[in-house]
Amino acid sequence: MSRGVRLGLVLAVLVTAGGVVLWQQSPDRSIAPSEVNQREELEADQALVRVDVAEEESPEEVISPSEPVNLSAMWSELNRIALEKLAAGDLEGAISDLEQCVEEEPNEPVFSANLAEALARLARSLQESGENSLEPSILLLERAMELAPERGELARLLSRWKATAATEEDFWTDETAHFLVSYDGGRSDVMKYGYYQLESMLEIAYDDFGVALNHYPVGHGDPKIRVVLYRRDEFTEITGIGHWAGGVFDGVVRIPLGDFETQKAQLELVLRHEVLHAFVRSLGGKEVPAWLNEGLAQWFEEPSAGRRESRVKAARAKLKGRTSLFPLETLQGTLATWKDESDISFGYAQSLALVDHLSRWYGEPVLIEMVRGCKKGVSSADSFALRTGLDLESILQDLAQSL
């Protein structure tokens, strides 16, 4: 099959979405950051902390809509139109236009670079949607690499996706009402003992979060949420994250699991945490600030109100050890690239304590509206101000005074 025909077949089945979130252990314990794989990620000392991880070197780089010189005005204009489509999120349309430009002017680097970027974005968005198969994304990224072989971050992403596909090639997939659960079919601990308990954990979490957030992703048109269980060495190879990581959400919930029976209590917490991130993605898109996203994941992770209260108390106790709280602007993006381990732990404690504080004084509906607003392009601070008439930073000061 020719490359053009292959790509045409791939484009016929594409969908879009976004992001990456990591479960580690509790924010009241110290962690030590280190360099891992493509990104600066966090390595914990024995215990885990919940972390919202930066997306590995994303292929979504900013493109300047430069006009190639000395070329037909027709192709220059089509390149400009394609970039407008790319900015608007019409990835398939942009690719179609840019393929024409490259076919007519194969030696023009601007056209090739722009097409490589569009293909990479489409490959990435397909995986972030939770699509079950990696093959279409791999084909798209291979084509992008042909056009832009100098882009090392794409080569690393392609290598990881190929390793993932090889690992999952013979995985068994069970389907529940709202999840697709994949794992090595040779795992007797899951096949014989764990499957029904695992299904129960996931579906209870789905119902709990659906009621709490008044949102059911699968019922609103999203695909079923993919959950993949790996052996620890497989998880480390695929994600580049060490033994300290409890799970990752990158459009797919990815969990390392040793023995089901001995780890099922921790597994339930990890699953709830990562599934909550999937709900937040569906409800608020990719622009939900880290403090709100991670604070909610920690807050809803515990199914027991008593244990949730204990975790909040531990977070508040940690905040008392600092002279001041972080401005919310500092906690907008991921904390994964932070260097100071005490700052990282403090940042997660502050996120949990602030979400709890907002819920106690203004109610959960305000938190939910802040998440929903992000998908509409309204910041969490603006959503809060519209609902309460108050400045969100002033609430942070209220939290500080209440400690």
Image (cartoon, rainbow, N blue to C red):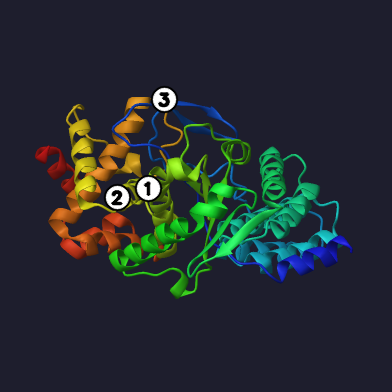
Q: Position of residue 184 (x, y in %)?
A: 63, 50
Mark 3: few, some, or many residues within 10 Å (few <14, many ≥20)?
some
For the residue labelled by badge 2, is the local secondary structure a helix, a strand or a loop? Answer: loop
1 vs 3, front mark: 1
The numbered mark, 2 or 3, whose residue comes first in the sequence reads 3
Q: Which mark is residue 45?
A: 3
| Residue 222 against residue 172 in the figure, above or below | below
Looking at the image, residue 236 sits to the left or right of residue 211; the answer is right
Give the residue drawn at x 19%, y 26%.
321
Q: Nearer the viewer, residue 11 or 127?
A: 127
Q: Which residue is mark 2?
A: 302
| Residue 323 against residue 119 in the figure, above or below | above
For the residue labelled by badge 3, is the local secondary structure a helix, a strand or a loop? Answer: loop
For the residue labelled by badge 1, is the local secondary structure a helix, a strand or a loop? Answer: helix
- Amino acid type, callout 2: Glu
Q: Position of residue 130 (x, y in %)?
A: 57, 60
Q: Which residue is mark 1?
A: 269
- Amino acid type, callout 3: Asp
Q: Nearer the viewer, residue 134 or 59?
A: 134
Q: Position of residue 263 (x, y in %)?
A: 44, 41
The numbered mark, 2 or 1, whose residue comes first in the sequence reads 1
The numbered mark, 1 or 3, whose residue comes first in the sequence reads 3
Looking at the image, residue 194 sits to the left or right of residue 329; the answer is right
| Residue 47 against residue 282 in the figure, above or below | above
- Amino acid type, callout 1: Leu
Give the residue drawn at x 39%, y 56%.
276
**Given contact means CB atoms under 8 Å apart, are the residues at marks 2 and 1 in contact?**
yes
Give the residue drawn at x 71%, y 63%.
95
Q: Gap in Å between the C-alphas at discs 2 and 1?
A: 7 Å
Q: Nearer the viewer, residue 42 or 23?
A: 23
Mark 2: few, some, or many residues within 10 Å (few <14, many ≥20)?
some
